[in-house]
């Protein structure tokens, strides 16, 4: 899989963050995001970014996070440049603020996706009232990203093995070459999804409206602490004003 | 002599991108005109090994030479002219709108003259019993038919080395006979053939040599008779001797018959009758 997609792939590890309930993790990421969007001070942005980074480090996912950072860097540079050019008044401060904010927002979301299994995620969504059909669709689509990547590789290999050169001809010809790749791929994926649908029905999916669960989500003590911390983070943009701190 | 080997595999190690080591140092030489079978338990690395023969997979360590040419230095589309591989899953290798085009596709890629493409497409569709489907979409065929279609597509462009991954899987008796007939044809054409299979009876009839694989290694390489009459060797690769071999071995334990090669049914009957009349 290509490296930017790595950001959303769950690799199992046993850390404090992994053991949290997905709902409290979601609250944490969301509060960091909200605080970052609400706060106009550079200092506060640095605090949020540092906090999100610390949490990723605590979850031992720094190595997975760096490719994402690299991937978004050009985008951040563009945001910085655009704000520098188009902002009246103090463009440097504002441009830095916007760039930092973008880093903070992506980091806090990466934190959530890196530490939550797709299964946990769909459980959490169901608890929030999302119908099971949709949560299943969601987990399955995540589950099929690597499978699809494998299929692309296999079909490409088969094409080359029939003497086909994908990079032959001019640009238009090359684009056409990819049709040869797409046809078997689409047919294969459609077939696969039909098979999955049959398999689901064969296992009585949808037979009862409210099926029982083998795993259920349960908030524990650390979860409540995280929820309290999240609430504090969410209101923290007000802190400089309340404490009368004059920071930029 | 090195120049005699059609396929030369040296200390091949292959690690999949996920980190799984599927081949752990494989050495193998297939002579020109040799007909070999690769057998072994599921997941032993057979498919991984043959994917190295046209460079679709490149060695993590070691090297693979085809007619003396290193696979790392030649594009797959060029090596494929020499090495035709029929992959295990037909669905990943059908690209055309009709059965006819499917067989013609590689020949067009390799620049065969139109008249030749036409003749050979017809001939190989007939050989594989698919000629009546020529205007159908390949995807409407049954799994067994799709597999035979991919075999036809490879044989039609006449590669020197032919590699077949599980050619008989899912084929009924009659179609197996069709494929058998094709194997005989390849023999008389003195092609170099590598087949990956779990089909013991099929193997005994055609191959010069069986290469047994287990857990990413080659554990044995010998004539079918030696391999199939050696239960412990087969067991080490997760395989069962064919029924005839088991019968012969049991008779041999009872002192009735000593097999030196895999017997025909008639030989066993003769041996038993001889003992009976004594
Ligand atoms: N794309 C891949 N990525 C990671 N591991 C793989 C991949 N393809 C195969 N493997 C692993 O490599 C090992 C060997 O696989 P391979 O397909 O070569 O086995 P095989 O001998 O052909 O088995 P079978 O008899 O089932 O066809 C298996 O354990 C398999 O899980
Ligand atoms: Mg295989």
Image (cartoon, coloured by chain):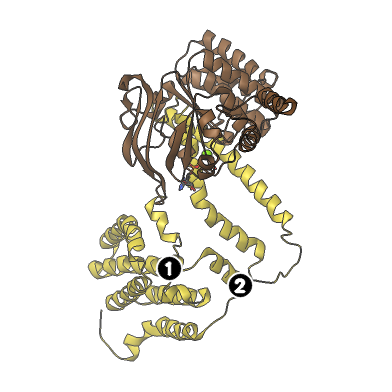
* x and y, in percent, of residue B109 in the image: 46, 21
Q: CA distance from mark 1 to mark 2?
A: 19 Å
Rendered image: mark on residue B24: none
- Residue located farthest toward the top when viewing the structure as drawn: B115
Q: Which residue is mark 1?
A: A13
Q: State the residue position of label 2.
A: A215
Q: Which residue is at the front of the view, A231 or A141?
A: A141
Chain B takes which shade in the image?
Answer: brown
Residue A184 at x, y percent in the picture: 56, 35
In this rendering, position of residue A81 left or right of residue B252? left
Specify few, some or many for label 2: CA neighbours under 10 Å numbering under 14, 14-19, or 20 or more.
Answer: few
Nearer to us in this view, B216 or B151 = B216
* Residue situated in front as seen by the camera: B15 or A217: B15
Circles 1 and 2 in contact, beta carbons < 8 Å: no
Give SS at disc 1.
Answer: loop
Location of residue A229 (image quadrant): bottom left
Q: Name the chain letter of the residue that bears numbered label 2.
A: A
Among the 4 quarters of the image, the one containing residue B217: top left
Q: Image check: A116 left or right of A37?
A: right
The reply to the same-chain question for discs 1 and 2 is: yes
**What color was chain A assigned in the picture?**
yellow
């Amino acid at each position: 899989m290509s490296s930017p997609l790595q950001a959303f792939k769950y690799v199992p590890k046993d850390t404090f963050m992994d053991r949290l309930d997905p709902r409290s993790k979601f609250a944490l990421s969301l509060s960091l995001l909200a605080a970052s969007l609400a706060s106009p001070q550079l200092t506060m942005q640095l605090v949020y970014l540092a906090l999100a980074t610390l949490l990723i480090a605590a979850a031992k996912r720094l190595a997975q996070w760096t490719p994402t950072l690299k991937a978004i860097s050009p985008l951040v540079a563009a945001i910085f440049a655009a704000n520098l050019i188009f902002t009246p008044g103090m463009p440097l401060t504002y441009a830095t603020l916007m760039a930092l904010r973008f880093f903070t927002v992506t980091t806090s979301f990466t934190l959530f996706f890196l530490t939550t299994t797709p299964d946990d995620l769909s459980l959490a969504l169901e608890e929030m009232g999302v119908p099971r059909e949709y949560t299943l669709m969601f987990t399955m689509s995540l589950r099929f990203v690597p499978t699809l990547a494998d299929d692309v590789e296999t079909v490409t290999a088969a094409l080359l093995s029939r003497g086909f050169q994908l990079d032959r001809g001019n640009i238009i010809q090359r684009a056409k070459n990819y049709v040869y790749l797409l046809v078997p791929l689409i047919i294969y994926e459609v077939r696969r999804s039909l098979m999955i649908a049959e398999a689901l029905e064969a296992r009585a999916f949808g037979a009862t409206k409210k099926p029982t669960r083998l795993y259920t989500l349960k908030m524990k003590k650390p979860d409540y602490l995280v929820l309290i911390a999240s609430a504090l983070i969410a209101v923290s943009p007000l802190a400089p004003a309340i404490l009368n701190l004059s920071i930029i | 002599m090195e120049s005699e080997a059609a396929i030369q595999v040296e200390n091949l190690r292959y690690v999949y991108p996920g980190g799984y080591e599927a081949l752990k140092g494989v050495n193998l030489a297939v002579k020109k005109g040799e007909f070999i079978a690769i057998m072994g338990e599921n997941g032993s690395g057979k498919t991984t090994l043959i994917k190295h023969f046209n460079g679709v997979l490149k060695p993590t360590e070691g090297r693979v030479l085809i007619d003396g040419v290193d696979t790392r230095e030649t594009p797959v589309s060029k090596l494929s002219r020499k090495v035709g591989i029929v992959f295990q899953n037909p669905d990943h290798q059908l690209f055309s709108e009709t059965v006819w085009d499917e067989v013609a596709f590689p020949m067009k890629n390799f620049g065969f003259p139109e008249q030749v493409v036409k003749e050979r497409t017809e001939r190989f569709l007939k050989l594989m019993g698919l000629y009546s489907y020529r205007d159908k979409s390949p995807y409407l065929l049954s799994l067994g038919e799709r597999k035979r279609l991919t075999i036809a597509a490879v044989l039609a462009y006449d590669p020197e080395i032919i590699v077949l991954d599980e050619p008989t899987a899912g084929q009924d008796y009659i179609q197996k006979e069709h494929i058998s007939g094709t194997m005989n044809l390849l023999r008389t054409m003195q092609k170099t053939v590598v087949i990956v299979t779990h089909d013991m009876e099929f193997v005994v009839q055609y191959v010069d040599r069986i290469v047994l694989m287990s857990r990413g290694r080659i554990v044995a390489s010998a004539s079918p008779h030696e391999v199939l009459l050696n239960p412990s060797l087969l067991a080490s690769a997760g395989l069962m001797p064919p029924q005839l071999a088991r019968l012969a071995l049991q008779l041999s334990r009872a002192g009735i018959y000593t097999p030196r090669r895999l017997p025909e049914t008639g030989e066993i009957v003769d041996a038993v009758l001889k003992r009976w009349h004594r």
